Amino acid sequence: MNNPKQPLITVQNISKHYVVTQNIFSPKTIIKAVDDVSFTISKGESLGLIGESGSGKTTVASLVLKLIKADTGKVVYKDTDLTSLTEDEMRTMRKELQIIFQHSQGTLDPKMTVAEFLTEPLLLHKIVKPYETSKEVSRLLNLVGLSESDKSKFPYQMSGGQLQRVGIARAISTRPTFIICDEPVSALDVSIQGQILNLLKDLQKELDLTYLFISHNLKVVKHICDRVAVMYKGKLIEINNTRAILEDPSEEYTKKLVESML
Ligand SMILES: Nc1ncnc2c1ncn2[C@@H]1O[C@H](COP(=O)(O)OP(=O)(O)O)[C@@H](O)[C@H]1O
Ligand SMILES: [Mg+2]
């Protein structure tokens, strides 16, 4: 039994620096993609992460899920220090920690049908028995607003919004507790964005999910996030409840950023 007051995710002083050279004549420079960032997320919460392009949001997401290795710092999920897990242990843990990308198309194999794509994680993580996968895929499609007839479709036969629904179905297929949404509606037509946001919000309630929601869209932040963290040049400069960040930020930079997002 987890202590209800204990955060679901604790990020402590994580950093990721890259050494880059523009060309052989120029000196090496260090890019502090993420620089000593700390925050917590409670169970059931939606924490927004905002900041201009290049401020380090996607790097934070990758560090939290250990898709890349941190230079320093640690990430604790429930009682487990993810940084201390072996590759094998992390693979098992991944079913609880999922991510939805901006471009689900990029993660879909063009030669795989929707059913094949969704069956893969079900078998890998032994979510259901092999003979139950077809029924489970139908259940997932239903949850994300797709239908039985979509099972046999290939990615090129679907719209951007439908593909994002498939990406969401794959993320929830392993019955995760925590999902990082990295700009999940930014690549979609404005008319579709609201539908996908509502879906994510409904799923959060229905499946008791906790979100880290990366977005540069104020509508998204207002609609989904309980609190918002602001990044600037690799640093987390402010974190507060959504209303305070949008209406009464303490940092001048946050005010400018929020105005630029309007
Ligand atoms: N693999 C990498 N090698 C070198 N620089 C990187 C790498 N990944 C990210 N960066 C740099 O780190 C900074 C933060 O990138 P990113 O986390 O993608 O920002 P955001 O998601 O906020 O747009 C950027 O300056 C980016 O160019
Ligand atoms: Mg990004």
Image (cartoon, rainbow, N blue to C red):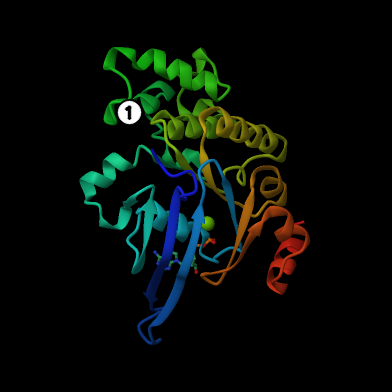
Taking the spot 67% from the left edge, 32% from the top edge, the residue there is: 195
Q: In which quadrant of the rendered view does residue 95 lie?
A: top left
Relative image position of residue 93 (x, y in whole percent): 31, 42
In the image, the residue with mark 1 has its CB under 8 Å from the nearest atom of ligand 2: no
Relative image position of residue 111 (x, y in whole percent): 37, 29
Taking the spot 41% from the left edge, 69% from the top edge, the residue there is: 15
Q: How many marks?
A: 1
Relative image position of residue 128 (x, y in whole percent): 32, 20
Q: Which residue is mark 1?
A: 120
Taking the spot 46% from the left edge, 59% from the top edge, the residue there is: 60
| Nearer the observer, 86 or 262 | 86
Left or right: 91 as drawn, with respect to 241: left
Q: Is residue 169 visible?
A: yes
| Nearer the observer, 192 or 33 | 33
Relative image position of residue 224 (x, y in whole percent): 65, 43
> What amino acid does circle 1 point to?
Glu
Q: In which quadrant of the rendered view does residue 21 lie?
A: bottom left
Secondary structure of the residue carrying numbered label 1? helix
Q: Residues within 10 Å of mark 1 (few under 14, many from 20)?
A: some
